[in-house]
């Protein structure tokens, strides 16, 4: 039936990469067959079954059913991936050279072991003259042969090193290859089985989710000195190992969590009045009556087959009668011999006798001890529903007194139990509590190796200043659409893609704290006047066409302003001169006056004027008797922070191009004459 269905090839059209995972959309077109069932090929093996969505883009018709099914195809000998054939050939060549080197080393050892062996002398035989010429000729032969063999060995060793290097390079390339090219003789993929009500030519869009895709935002900022406008290029580092290469696709990047549930919660209603039974969940139907008798004839036929006798086991208990060995053709007999409750006559092969009228109707074959509950995932069910609770409250076969039937609890089928198309009907070879009932498929469809490779993408090392989008986005979700098609292979490494170019406003100012360090630092105020949110990430800053540094850009919402540190400005110089004078005042010199004067010099060697923010500090009085008088011209911070405490004093000055400026300030501390500042009065 599957071979008669029409198979449509599809092409990847667009991809939306989320914080973890991606949503892919494929397009396929063709003429609908008479039954409206088609198979859309080209889906990866890791396509999530529950995420499949199919819609009709053009043509008449509507989609009534869609599901993902695995597809395997046996490859021909010449259809294996090129990297696999290359690796096999290089490995065979390396092994051949290694074996040749071993033979060469054995031959060298054999030649080097050649020694003259004199014959054994008898007792009555006198001394013989040594054949010196023969010994010398043998030595010359060994030396000449070893010289030739050593030259061949050196040449062969070079060939072995070259072959091993080529094999190692091919192995590294094979490990870094795209996961879309899998080795082996079987090509695994997935297909979308779609049923469309309509006729004629239609175009379908197939949407599915895949794991194994991540992205990080990166930026490139270019501006010129003295200008307010700047150009910010938003880029993305994307890595994916989904099992398919993204070639020429429309790429979009989203900060949303793909695995976050978005269903509408169901609120339970409160009703005042008489208690009413809760309605059964939608999609569940009770099991049909007489399900146990459905296999009665099959059991009789299986029991009538002759079973070969087996010898007694050594060490059997005395008086134990030999029984038939359970064979593969009698699984039902093994199930009956277990003595499941609700099936009298555990090992008998006779038809089930009628139950007494005094007993209530017996439910269909309850599960054996240790079987899963009806509300647990994977529990037995009929017609896509969960097994009723009568399975758990079935009366035992040994009870003789009548019992009232237990009231079944409300069934709570899971989502996979309500997926009717994915259920499998258990046959007569299954256990008695499974036969004739529907169960979800327990075998995972995706390969374990492919899933592990997809999970490794989430553990890639982040670049410097890189922040995952789910962390930097906070409570808002945003989507960025790339302006040009992108090519991203499924190799699990970072690939940079240009997303968009955003106009921003910048203002360069300079900050110095000469009391801590006599250096001036450049700060770039970045204002986001666009409708796009800027996530935290690394930004490459270039000034006047020259690369300056890579800094960390904080998250910037639309309309927000943030500061970006650019490092030390060598063109600006600062020097701080301080002086402390101690004196007394008041009646009888009862007050000690500590006069701190500060003079700050700024020199600008830039080709344009520079706005410099100078930060100083003043002491804070901890007692009412201590008074502090500040010199005018300095102001406290508008919004104190950890970097700029309330005791800081700020003054801004514009230094002309090639000029200098001088600032004066300070403070006066008045303390009682009998006291002193901890650490000494004369301090700056």
Image: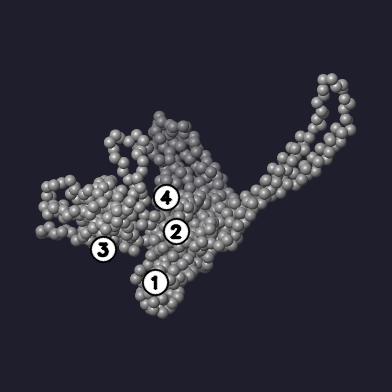
Q: Dot 4: within a 10 Å radius of its alpha carbon, few (fewer than 14), some, or many (20 or more) residues? A: some
The residue tagged 3 is: 283
Upstream in sequence: badge 1 or badge 4: 1
Instruction: Give the distance between the C-alpha atoms of the residues marked 2 and 4, in whole angstroms.
Output: 56 Å
- Residue 258: horizontal and vertical position, in percent? 39, 58
Q: Residue at x 45, y 62 (%)?
A: 71
Instruction: Report how far apart the C-alphas of labels 1 and 4 lie in the structure.
Output: 72 Å
Tell me which numbered mark, 2 or 4, is placed earlier along the sequence: 2
Query: Depth-wise, is mark 1 or mark 4 nearer the camera?
Result: 1
Q: Tell me whether the residue at label 3 lies in contact with that at label 2, contact meaning CB atoms closer than 8 angstroms.
A: no
x, y (%) of residue 626?
38, 37
Which tag is nearer the camera, tag 3 or tag 2? 3
Q: Which residue is mark 4?
A: 637
SS under mark 3: loop
In three-dimensional space, the C-alpha distance between marks 1 and 3, rounded to whole angstroms, equals 24 Å
In the image, residue 278 sits, relative to residue 108, either above or below, namely below
- Name the residue located 82 percent from the left edge and 24 percent from the top edge: 121
């Amino acid at each position: 039936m599957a071979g008669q269905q029409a198979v449509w090839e599809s092409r990847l059209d667009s991809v939306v990469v989320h914080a973890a995972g991606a949503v892919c959309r494929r397009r396929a077109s063709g003429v609908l067959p008479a039954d409206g069932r088609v198979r859309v090929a080209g889906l990866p093996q890791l396509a999530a079954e529950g995420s499949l969505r199919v819609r009709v883009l053009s043509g008449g018709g509507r989609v009534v059913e869609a599901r993902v099914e695995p597809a395997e195809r046996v490859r021909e000998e010449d259809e294996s991936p090129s990297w696999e054939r290359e690796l096999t050939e290089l490995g065979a060549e390396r092994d051949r050279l290694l074996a040749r080197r071993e033979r060469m080393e054995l031959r060298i050892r054999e030649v080097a072991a050649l020694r003259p062996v004199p014959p054994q002398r008898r007792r009555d035989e006198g001394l013989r003259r040594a054949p010196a010429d023969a010994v010398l000729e043998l030595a010359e032969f060994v030396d000449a042969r070893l010289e030739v063999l050593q030259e061949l060995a050196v040449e062969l060793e070079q060939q072995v090193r070259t072959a091993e290097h080529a094999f190692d390079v091919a192995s590294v390339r094979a490990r870094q290859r795209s996961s879309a090219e899998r080795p082996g003789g079987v090509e695994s993929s997935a297909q979308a089985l779609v049923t469309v009500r309509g006729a004629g030519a239609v175009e379908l869009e197939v949407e599915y989710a895949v794991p194994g895709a991540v992205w990080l935002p990166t930026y490139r900022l270019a501006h010129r000195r003295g200008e307010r406008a700047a150009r910010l290029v938003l880029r993305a580092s994307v890595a994916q190992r989904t099992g398919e290469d993204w070639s020429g696709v429309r790429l979009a990047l989203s900060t949303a969590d793909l695995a976050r549930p978005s269903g509408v919660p169901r609120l339970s209603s409160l009703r005042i009045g008489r208690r009413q039974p809760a309605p059964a969940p939608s999609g569940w139907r009770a099991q049909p009556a007489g399900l146990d008798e459905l296999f009665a004839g099959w059991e009789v036929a299986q029991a009538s087959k002759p079973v070969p006798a087996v010898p007694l086991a050594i060490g059997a208990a005395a008086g134990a009668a030999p029984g038939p060995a359970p064979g593969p053709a009698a699984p039902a007999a093994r199930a009956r011999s277990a003595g499941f409750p609700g099936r009298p006559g555990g090992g008998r092969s006779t038809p089930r006798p009628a139950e007494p009228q005094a007993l209530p109707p017996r439910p269909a074959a309850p599960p054996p001890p240790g079987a899963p509950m009806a509300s647990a995932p994977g529990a037995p069910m009929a017609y896509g529903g969960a097994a009723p609770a009568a399975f758990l409250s079935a009366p035992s076969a040994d009870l003789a007194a009548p019992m009232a039937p237990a009231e079944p609890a409300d069934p709570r089928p899971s989502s996979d139990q309500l997926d009717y198309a994915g259920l499998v009907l258990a046959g007569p070879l299954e256990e008695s509590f499974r036969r004739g009932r529907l169960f979800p498929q327990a075998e995972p469809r995706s390969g374990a190796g492919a899933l592990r490779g997809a999970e490794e993408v989430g553990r890639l090392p982040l670049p410097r200043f890189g922040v995952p989008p789910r962390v930097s986005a906070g409570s808002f979700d945003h989507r960025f659409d790339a302006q040009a098609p992108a090519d991203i292979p499924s190799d699990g490494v970072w690939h940079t893609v240009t997303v968009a170019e955003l106009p921003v406003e910048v203002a360069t100012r300079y900050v110095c704290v000469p009391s801590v360090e006599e250096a001036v630092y450049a700060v770039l105020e970045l204002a986001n006047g666009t409708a796009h949110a800027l996530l935290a990430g690394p930004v490459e800053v270039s000034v006047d066409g020259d690369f300056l540094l890579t800094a960390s850009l904080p998250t910037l919402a639309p309309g927000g302003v943030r500061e970006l540190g650019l490092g030390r400005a060598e063109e600006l110089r600062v020097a701080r001169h301080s002086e402390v004078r101690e004196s007394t005042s008041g009646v009888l010199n009862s007050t000690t006056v500590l006069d701190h004067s500060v003079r700050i010099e700024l020199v600008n060697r830039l080709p344009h004027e520079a706005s410099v923010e100078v930060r100083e500090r003043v002491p804070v009085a901890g007692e009412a008797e201590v008074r502090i008088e500040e010199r005018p011209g300095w102001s406290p911070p508008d919004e104190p922070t950890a970097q700029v405490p309330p005791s800081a004093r700020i003054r801004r000055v514009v230094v002309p191009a090639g000029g200098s400026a001088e600032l004066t300030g300070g403070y006066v501390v008045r303390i009682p004459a009998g006291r002193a500042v901890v650490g000494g009065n004369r301090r700056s």
